Amino acid sequence: MPSLALLGGSPLRKRPFLRWPIFAEADRAALLKTFESGEWGGYGVAVRQFEAEFAKAQDSLHGITAANGTLSLEAALLACGIRPEDEVIVPPISFVATATAVLRVGAIPVFTDIDLQSYNLDPATVAAAITSATKAIIPVHFAGHPANMDALMPLAARHGLAVIEDCAHAHGASWKSRKVGSFGNFGSFSFQQSKNMTAGEGGILVTNDARLAELAWSYGNQGRSPSGAWYQHDRLGTNLRLTSLQAALLGVQLERLPKQLAQRAKNAARLRSGLDSGSILCAPEFDSRVTAHGLHLFVMRLNTERHPELSRGQVAEALIAEGITGVSYYPYPLYRNKLFQNYRHRVLPCPNAEQMARECLWLTNDVLLGSAEDVDDVLSAIAKVTEFAEELLSMNTEKAQ
Ligand SMILES: *Cc1c(COP(=O)(O)O)cnc(C)c1O
């Protein structure tokens, strides 16, 4: 085999992978139909229809769309009555919005550790972090793998805590055959460009609680009440509305989701069977209670037993040089971001999150929705990096000199 592309060899893959988002004539038709209706704003029929369809698809009674999946988290926190000085437990392995939404409502994020199988909040560390100030938990279904709702829901109930599921990675995912977002007081989804359903930007809350649905809707609609008059404002709100043009696109994306989830599952299975114990990257293990994995990301861990000196960053760099696009990772747990220095927060010991952030990287839509040949190219690239691990290491020492 020729040398690594990173060290001057020829890249294993020269063709581009597919480009996300996937769209077709149906998206164009839906968009044009709404365009021509002239009903473009957040009060249009396309929005109401999408809210109903998406809520149903997530086993929920109510859907409340929002401008994005960050503001939907804020709306959920406010609807749940989270006040300044309240503590909200969040995982350190997530996108920053999970924690900054807590800060934006004046509350205090408390970071507790994850487990190293699902990379989600470990219920035992959550239990240990609860104080009299704790008012809510935001479990993130990281990568699309549902968090342990069997343990988290009773724990929250015992302490009277609200649960807001951050489902930004988990459209269509289910835990014991029940869709995520339907367990907690709210489920919050994102439709940002990279997510498994997208309208470029966008978000939605789902809930089974009519009162919470009304509060969240009111907050995002200038404090109006669903049955009130247009210029009647009953509480302080803002404008979080999604447009009808976005909702029209999302309706088509939702129809496509089951087929795409099946494709993601097929490619994930092929990746898993292609990674053995000698490989430089280890395949993820999924909890048997996960009945549908969202597979937004396919998370792999560096095989540190085989290659203790190699870094995750080097492996990622080598794979990207081989032409494998979409390889990415979180550089460190969230609480290491500078912004938190200026805000009250608590960090409990998070050795697993530290290890995850050091050792894991992932593949994204372009591989997970690709063909079997695409997946095989990724496996060949990983095999190539595995074979040339020593060369990659020597680059390390050259750099150090
Ligand atoms: C993308 C994302 C968000 C925020 O969604 P936006 O729509 O980009 O505001 C929140 N949480 C997680 C885990 C995310 O990945």
Image (cartoon, rainbow, N blue to C red):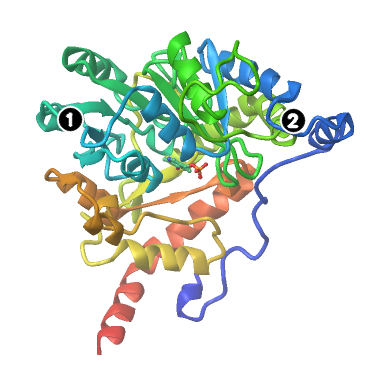
Instruction: State the residue at coordinates (46%, 24%).
Output: 235
In depth, the one of 50 and 265 nearer the eye is 50
Where, by quadrant of the figure, is residue 88 drawn?
top left
Q: Residue type at mark 2?
A: Ala
Question: Quick check: can you spot residue 209?
Answer: no
Instruction: Say which residue label 1 marks.
Output: 126
Pointer 2 residue: 248
The residue at the point 73 percent across, 29 percent down is 252
The label shown at residue 85 is none
Q: Check the picture and name the quadrant holding the C terminus.
A: bottom left
What residue do we see at 29% from left, 23% from top? 148
Residue 257: quadrant of the picture? top right
- Residue 319 position, x and y percent, is 47, 63
Classify residue 22 as left or right of residue 189.
Answer: right
Residue 346 higher or lower than 185, as above or below: below
| Residue 206 seen | yes
Instruction: Name the N-terminal-most of marks 2 and 1.
Output: 1
Between marks 2 and 1, how big is the CA–CA gap? 39 Å
Contact (Cβ within 8 Å) of mark 2 with mark 1: no
Residue farthest bottom in this picture: 401
Picture layout, residue 326 above or below residue 190: below
> Element under label 1?
helix
Give the residue type at disc 1.
Val
